[in-house]
Amino acid sequence: MSTSVVAAGQETSGGAPNEIDRALGEMLLAAAPALFEGHGVALDFGAQRPVLDPVAHEGYAGILGFGGTGIKGSVAIYLDDPTVRKSYPSAGSLAGTDEDILYLRDWTAELTNQLMGRLKNKLLRSGVDVMLGIPTAVSGVSFTLAYPGQTIPQAYDFLWDEGAAVVVLTAEAVPGLTLEEIDDPDAASAGEGELILF
Amino acid sequence: MPKILVIDDSATVRQQVSLTLGEEGFDIVEAVDGVDGAEKIAALDDINLVICDVNMPRMNGLDMLEKVRTSGDLGNTPVVMLTTEGSADLIKRGKALGAKGWVIKPFKANLLIAAAKNSRRSADRVAPTAPVHS
């Protein structure tokens, strides 16, 4: 089954609400601001956007695929230059040269990884385990998403005082899969920032 | 000066860890993935602690840990995993492979420092003592 939602919680073109996209959308709307807040950027959700509209700002894009029993997909993030620089952990180490692009691209890939990590931990609490791919990132002046057509991605705009971010989630799930939090100690996952000593 | 091998495919994370632990007096060596990490563990005999990511190209961190544990290259050197992965199954595997700690990214500097110091103390306790000859 392909999942296609125009807005989290809205009905799909087929008439029935898509629970998987709604659940993933809610996870994303919690995960993305929390991630960026931890890196010093107070992102607010703006709105869902038409997925084929180009992201017309110079910046960075990262993408990471995931797959598991009953679900597969990808997460992509588009960040403008101020957002990447503000979230960069050692902004003082950036030299103001072209080489900065390599570090900011690397950081965009890592942010994609950390965002997907948060989503994975939320999925685990619903009893759904997924394997993560290796993130990759590019830099450019305008980004337009192309997709095969069977699976319609969800695209979310986030804003803060000096910049913007867009997160695009694409997912396919088998019929009958649900993403409700379960009370299963074996499905528990450790939280972000947590330290476990053995 | 205690030497820490930091294995992560993100240059930014390696830099972040290096800055955090460098200020605490640790000497840092970096590796870019599991293959590079295994090679450095085999080549360097003065590493006091390994901090290792899980999801990396070429060889992931848990496979690398298994490899250097099986080969004997790791010896008693403690390993702390630093990753976005919070899966109970992966954490159990890391523990079974002898990891001493598991930190979920993004890390808090004080917790990473605590993990590094705790793992070193733990390694000191289990380090074999020299045989006494009369």
Image (tube, grey):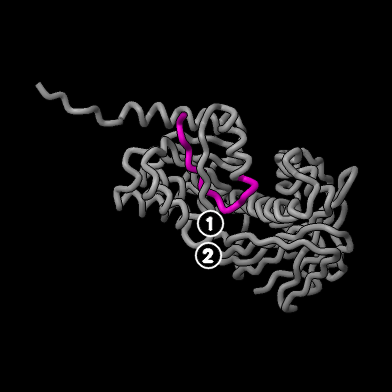
Q: Is residue A183 left or right of residue A49?
A: left
Q: Which residue is mark 1?
A: B56
Residue A23 in view in this figure: no
Q: Amino acid at mark 2?
A: Thr
Residue type highlighted by circle 1: Met
Residue at horizontal 65%, vertical 74%?
A: A1
Task: Answer left or right for B29 relative to A6.
Answer: left
Whether residue B4 appears in magenta in the rendering, the answer is: yes
Picture residue at 80% right of the left edge, 43% below the top = A86
As drawn, the label of residue A6 is: none
Mark 2 burial class by Cα count in 10 Å: few <14, some 14-19, many 20+: few
Question: Quick check: is A98 in the magenta stretch?
Answer: no
Q: Which residue lies under the disc numbered 2?
A: A69
Depicted A181 relative to depicted B126: above or below: below
Q: The residue tagged with tag 2: helix, strand or loop?
A: loop
Look at the image and give the residue range highlighted in magenta: B1-13
Kindly tell me whether residue A48 is visible in this rendering: yes
- Is there a contact, CB below 8 Å, between mark 1 and mark 2? no
Q: Please tell me which residue is depicted at 32% across the width and 42% down the height of the picture.
A: B75
Q: Which chain contains the residue that carries disc 2? A: A
Query: In x, y percent, where is residue A67?
Result: 57, 65
Toward the viewer: A166 or A69? A166
Count of numbered marks: 2
In which image quadrant can residue B21 be found?
A: top right
Residue visible at 51% across and 50% down in the picture: B31
Chain of the residue where label 1 is placed in the rendered structure: B
Percent of width and height locating residue A153: 75, 67
**Distance from Cα at disc 1 to Cα at disc 2:** 22 Å
Q: Of helix, strand and loop, which one carries label 1?
A: loop
Which residue of the protein is positioned furthest toward the top in this rendering? Answer: B134
